[in-house]
Image (spheres, grey):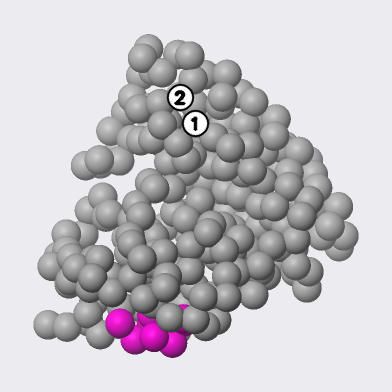
Amino acid sequence: MNLEKICSQVIEITKSVGEFILSEKSNIKELIVEEKGLHDFVTYVDKTSEERIVEKLKKIMPDAGFIAEEGTANNKGDKYNWVIDPLDGTTNFIHGITPFAISIALMEDNKVILGVVHELGLNECFYAWKDNPAYLNGEEIKVSSKNTVEKSLIATGFPYYDYDRLEPFMKTMEYFMQHSRGLRRLGSAATDLVYVACGRFEAFYEYSLNPWDVAAGAFIVQQAGGLVCDFNGENNYIFGKEIIASNRFVYNDFLSIVNDLMNKN
C-alpha cells in the first residue's frame, strides 16, 4: 500500500470539499441548523461535505469501511476504516468565526496509519502517514521544545454534555490559569491537536470527544514527535472519549496534573 500516494489523494479531497464549505460562508445566515443535542449542531454543509468525502474515498479504497460523524456511511470494515469529521468546528462556522477543519484518518486494525487535518480558515493542511514525519503545507513540523508547564500555552475544549465531570474539569482550568502561560479554547479539537503538532500549543486535553474529533490530529501529533494518551496515561484516547496530547518535555508533568485533578472524588 502506497500511503504517501493515498495521503496526497486525501489532501486533494480536503481541498475540493474545503472549497465547497468556504463557498457556503456567504449563506451562513440562511443555513438551516439542526440541533443534534445541547450545543451540538449540524447543517447541510456538514452532511453534504461528508457525502462528498465518502464518495471520493470509496474510489481510493473500495473495501474500506467508515466511522463518520454525520452517519452518511457507517459500514465498518474488517481491516481498514476511514474516520471522518467533515466539519470540525460547526458552531464556529455557523457564527462566521474560525477555526473549522476537515479531519480524515485511515485506520488499519484499529491503529491510525494516516491522518489529514485541513483547517480552512488559514488554509493550512496538516498531514502524516505511517513511518514518516508530519507536515504542514509541505513543510515538516515538530512539537515545541518548551520543557515546563509554566512555560506552556495549553488548549482545551468545553464538553457539550457529560457535565458530571464538570467540577474536576473546572479545577484543571483553575490550575492551568495560575500555572501556565494561558489557556485557549478554539472550538475545534482537530485544530487544537495539530497546533500541538506544529508547536503552537505545548499541550491539549479534553473529554467527551468522539473518534472523528481526534483520530487524525492525534496521529499527526505523534508523527511530529509528541505523545498522546487518555487521562490515565493509557492508549484509549480514540474511542475512550478523553485525550491528552503534548510535547515530550512536559508530558509527564501535564499528565500527572490532569490525572490527579480529573480523578479526584
Alpha carbon of mark 2 to alpha carbon of mark 1: how far?
Answer: 5 Å
Is the residue under label 1 in contact with that under label 2 (CB below 8 Å)? yes
Range shown magenta: 250-257
**The residue under label 1 is which amino acid type?**
Lys
From the viewer's perspective, tell me whether residue 58 is left or right of residue 86.
right
Residue at 69% x, 62% y is 141
Q: Main secondary structure of the magenta part?
A: helix
In the rendered image, which quarter is residue 167 located in?
bottom left
Residue at 57% x, 31% y is 49
Label at residue 44: 2
Label at residue 230: none
Q: Count every numbered label the image shows and give the total.
A: 2
Residue 204 or residue 12, whichever sits in front: 204
Is residue 63 part of the magenta span, yes or no?
Answer: no
Tell me if I can see residue 260 in this picture. yes
**Residue 185 coordinates in the image, percent (x, y):** 34, 52
**Residue 135 coordinates in the image, percent (x, y):** 72, 57
